[in-house]
């Protein structure tokens, strides 16, 4: 380490200057060539990976009000209410079927800790993760997503990624 | 009677020029720092305000500061606390007065016989403001920041003065205009002969400006924000503005003393416009180096600054003065 | 003003020597302070800038995880423990899961163990990169932060692409790693094995991490100001460190090669060829350098692991409702911050009877009062930063 005094300072200055030139190049070419670490957020958006745990989508069709998700949730941020509905038999003389119908399915994202246990335990494919992340709100209360809003997220559920062989 | 009118009109114009120049320079340099630091860290920097490049970012920031509440801590020494931010800004404005921009008439706002002496005296004014801010804030971190600034003042002021002495000996005048004229006459800047002096002046100027690697009075990781911790709103803006304009004025003084001021090979010295361009270009090179330093280096410790100043800079500066004097006498 | 007493002038008998007595000032560093990594509070008695006495106060972020674990089920606890040291969430899960597996007599399949190993080394890289970022920042250099975070982003992207979470993966399950997406008719067929392209991207990202290490080394390691600020500052002898229970890079910087990756068997580290980074002087600079070396060693481990990643199942057979048989065990692991251990006592229920968490940062900062005494304020920041603690890991 027989470097002259000030050598380390100059090497450091070289690094920052080089980075500056690289960033200029990157901006001039208009692309992210691995040099620019941030993007122009509202204009350019980061694309999260398919498995990213952004927000939970609810498929109301599949939900049977079994409450498993609400029970397994570590911080109880899922609120479910439902009632039994009697379905008229489809053919005459048939049995009257009971069907559970969802009245309320709220997830309080102000409380949710994004562990994914609810999605994991759902036995009827009603809950999915989607990588969407733009749902911040000005008021804490608005972080409570009701069942319609959760249903809307269904359109953003990505396909599961291929598995490494 | 007419003489008095001319005097007052001239004064009004001069004050107007300074009043426009200070925020303008502050904004340009603040923006340059934001953008350049971003690029050195492979970021984009401000890009949203004002459409392209985010050029209005600093105006938006200024507007934001004006809207903010002016909070004065309950235990603060109110008058001192209120007036402290004004001093650095006044010092900065007073410095702009003696920077020559061309050899023509009105090429300098006020050419003083003892220009550089005045500059060095005025430039320590901002430290008084810092000390006042640190003392009056009723905050232990502010107090420490203020005291660090005071300790720093003693350490760097001496090398700063001694570095200038070499130039004064060589030029034979203390007038800023005279120093530039001396360099014009010999057609090369003093940095060639006074390189040591220039280096010492630059390092000491960094310490005076409280910029990394000498930003111990602020040292946000140690003292939260040092002497500005308790300031908010417009008063904070004053400190902020003074810091950036001071960066320019110190660079401009360094340019005038060592790099030939508004003079450049092949450019006529009697045009105010060309003079301003040359001066700004040269100053900006120095400002860029300051920004470059800031975003590359860590900061020193207070005692290390003292070591650097007393054991290295002052002996070297004295040596420089002796050598310059000897040459002046011999040649 | 908040100085406790007025400055008093004492004129001694000899009129020439005037002594100004300045009483010590009590300075509260924290709980809100830029350099306390959260909400650590130091009550420092300072004489000018010199610290005569310092008392660390912790507990501002106590979240009661040990108690909380007693009323949660094992799958739920996984999502809690990865919030202990949040910059290396994945590594926190492993000792807990291994403890539960040992009590149940289950062993994770080889592939699951290797994936765990790769991801926990990634957690180590991301944790150390945070240190590489924050430590120069505390000394005033802001730029290494962005270089380190740029590389860390790649590592976190990889973690996210496998587990779905950047910080809190919640990916380990008793008997392996999370096997499938859900338990519904279609979701239970969706495997959660590593996604396609992961191995290639990892190779790429590891080169990037090495490049960043070089860049940071250029920017910081030789910098005379950095050396002046860190060399010989905050020297921790091995014996003192061992007495206080300091572990991990902080202890290794003092010159011992105590590394649980070599000494314990919670993950198959014995199948890998890597060195333990050891420092010499135990000062701030060595603590910084050891972590930089550890990033490089972690890259080496990951490169070996992805080259030889075994195929096979990622989950052993475990009952659907997990109940851990009666017993108790202690599993310790080498986390990025040091030794992390879980003492798990089960009474046979679906949750632990008692879970004692031995977290690295808590022990590491227990010697703060010893090491900070007599330092000056800028050195306090330098020393505290070099210990690399996370308040979540201290208070739990």
Image: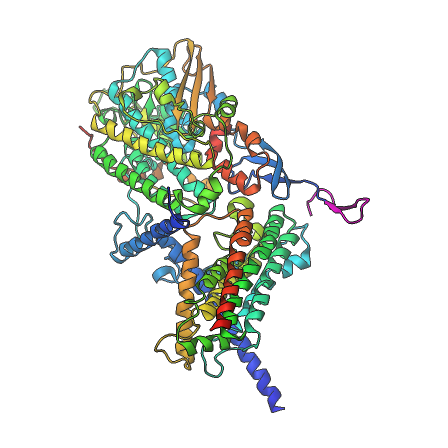
Q: Is residue C16 magenta?
A: yes
Up-down relation of residue C6 to residue C339 (above or below) = below
**Quadrant holding the N terminus of chain B:** bottom right
Range of the magenta residues?
C1-20
Q: Is residue C113 visible?
A: yes
Image location (x, y in percent) of residue C71 = 46, 19
Would you say the magenta stretch is mainly helix, strand or loop? Answer: loop
Up-down relation of residue C16 to residue A141 (above or below) = below
Image location (x, y in percent) of residue A89 = 25, 24
Of all residues, the one furthest to the left in this rendering is: A165
Q: Residue at x 36, y 13 (%)?
A: C102
Up-down relation of residue C143 to residue B121 (above or below) = above
Question: Is B67 placed left or right of A137 in the picture?
Answer: right
Q: Nearer the viewer, residue C264 or B230?
A: C264
Q: How is the image coloured?
A: rainbow
Q: Is residue B59 visible?
A: no
């Amino acid at each position: 380490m027989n470097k002259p005094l000030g050598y380390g300072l100059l090497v450091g200055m070289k690094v920052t200057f080089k980075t500056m030139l690289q960033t200029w190049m990157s901006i001039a070419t208009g692309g992210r060539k691995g040099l620019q670490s941030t993007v122009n957020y509202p204009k350019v958006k980061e694309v999260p990976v398919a498995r990213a745990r952004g927000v939970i989508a609810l498929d109301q069709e599949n939900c049977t009000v079994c409450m498993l998700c609400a029970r397994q949730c570590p911080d109880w941020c899922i609120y479910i209410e439902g009632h039994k509905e009697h379905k008229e038999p489809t053919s005459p003389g048939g049995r009257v079927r009971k069907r559970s119908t969802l009245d309320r399915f709220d997830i309080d994202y102000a409380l949710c800790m994004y562990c994914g246990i609810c999605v994991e335990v759902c036995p009827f494919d009603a809950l999915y993760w989607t990588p969407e992340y733009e749902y911040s709100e000005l008021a804490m209360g608005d972080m409570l997503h009701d069942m319609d809003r959760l249903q809307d997220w269904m359109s953003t559920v990505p396909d599961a990624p291929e598995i490494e062989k | 009677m007419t003489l008095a009118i001319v005097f007052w009109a001239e004064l009004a114009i001069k004050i107007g020029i300074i009043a426009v120049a200070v925020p303008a320079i502050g904004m340009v340099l603040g923006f340059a720092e934001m953008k350049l630091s971003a690029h050195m860290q492979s970021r984009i920097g401000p890009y949203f305000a004002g459409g392209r490049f985010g050029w209005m970012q600093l105006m938006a920031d200024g507007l934001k500061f004006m809207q903010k509440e002016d909070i004065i801590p309950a235990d603060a020494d109110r008058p001192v606390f209120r007036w402290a931010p004004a001093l650095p800004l006044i010092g900065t404005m007073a410095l702009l007065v003696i920077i020559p921009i061309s050899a023509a008439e009105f090429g300098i706002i006020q050419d003083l016989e003892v220009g550089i002496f005045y500059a060095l005296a005025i430039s320590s004014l901002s430290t008084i403001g810092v000390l006042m801010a640190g003392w009056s804030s009723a905050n232990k971190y502010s107090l420490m920041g203020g005291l660090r600034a005071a300790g720093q003042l003693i350490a760097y002021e001496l090398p700063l003065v001694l570095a200038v002495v070499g130039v004064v000996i060589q030029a034979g005048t203390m007038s800023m205009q005279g120093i530039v004229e001396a360099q014009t006459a010999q057609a090369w800047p003093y940095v060639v002969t006074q390189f040591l002096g220039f280096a010492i002046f630059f390092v000491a100027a960094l310490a005076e400006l409280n910029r990394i690697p000498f930003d111990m009075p602020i040292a946000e990781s140690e003292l939260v924000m040092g002497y500005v911790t308790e300031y908010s709103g417009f008063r904070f803006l004053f400190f902020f503005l003074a810091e950036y304009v001071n960066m320019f004025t110190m660079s401009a003084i360094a340019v005038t003393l060592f790099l030939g001021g508004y003079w450049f090979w092949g450019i006529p010295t009697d045009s105010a416009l060309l003079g301003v361009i040359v001066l700004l270009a040269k100053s900006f090179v120095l400002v860029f180096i300051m920004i470059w330093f800031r975003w590359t280096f860590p900061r020193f410790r207070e005692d290390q600054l003292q070591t650097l100043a007393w054991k290295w800079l002052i002996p070297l500066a004295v040596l420089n003065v002796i050598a310059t004097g000897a040459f002046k006498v011999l040649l | 003003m908040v100085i406790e007493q007025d400055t008093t002038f004492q004129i001694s008998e000899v009129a020439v020597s005037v002594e100004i007595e300045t009483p010590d000032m009590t300075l509260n560093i924290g709980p809100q302070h830029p350099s306390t990594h959260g909400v650590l509070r130091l009550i420092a008695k300072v004489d000018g800038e010199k610290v005569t006495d310092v008392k660390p106060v912790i507990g501002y972020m106590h979240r009661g995880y040990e108690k909380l674990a007693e009323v949660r089920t094992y799958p739920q606890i996984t999502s809690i423990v990865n919030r202990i040291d949040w910059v290396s969430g994945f590594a926190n899960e492993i000792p807990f899961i291994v403890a539960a597996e040992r009590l149940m007599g289950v062993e994770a399949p080889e592939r699951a163990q290797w994936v765990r190993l790769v991801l926990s080394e990634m957690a180590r890289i991301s944790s150390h990169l945070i240190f590489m970022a924050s430590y120069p920042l505390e000394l005033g250099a802001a730029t290494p932060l962005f270089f380190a975070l740029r590389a860390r982003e790649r590592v976190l992207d990889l973690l996210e692409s496998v587990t779905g979470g950047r910080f809190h993966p919640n990916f380990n399950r008793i008997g392996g790693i999370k096997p499938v997406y859900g338990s519904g008719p279609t979701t239970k067929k969706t495997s959660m094995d590593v996604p396609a392209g992961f191995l290639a991207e990892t190779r790429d990202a590891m080169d990037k991490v090495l490049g960043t290490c070089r860049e940071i080394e250029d920017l910081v390691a030789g910098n005379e100001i950095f050396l002046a600020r860190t060399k010989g500052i905050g020297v921790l002898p091995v014996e003192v460190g061992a007495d206080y229970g300091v572990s991990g890079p902080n202890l290794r910087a003092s010159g011992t090669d105590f590394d649980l990756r070599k000494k314990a068997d919670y993950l198959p580290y014995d199948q890998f060829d890597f060195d333990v980074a050891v420092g010499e002087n135990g000062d701030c600079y060595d603590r910084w350098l050891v972590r930089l070396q550890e990033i490089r060693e972690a890259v080496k481990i990951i490169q070996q692991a992805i080259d030889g990643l075994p195929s096979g199942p990622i989950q052993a057979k475990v009952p659907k409702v997990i109940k851990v048989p009666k017993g108790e065990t202690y599993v310790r692991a080498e986390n990025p911050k040091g030794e992390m251990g879980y003492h798990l006592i089960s009474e046979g229920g679906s949750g632990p009877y008692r879970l004692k968490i031995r977290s690295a940062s808590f022990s590491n900062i227990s010697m703060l009062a010893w090491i900070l005494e007599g330092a000056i304020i800028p050195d306090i920041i330098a020393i505290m930063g070099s210990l690399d603690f996370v308040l979540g890991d201290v208070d739990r």
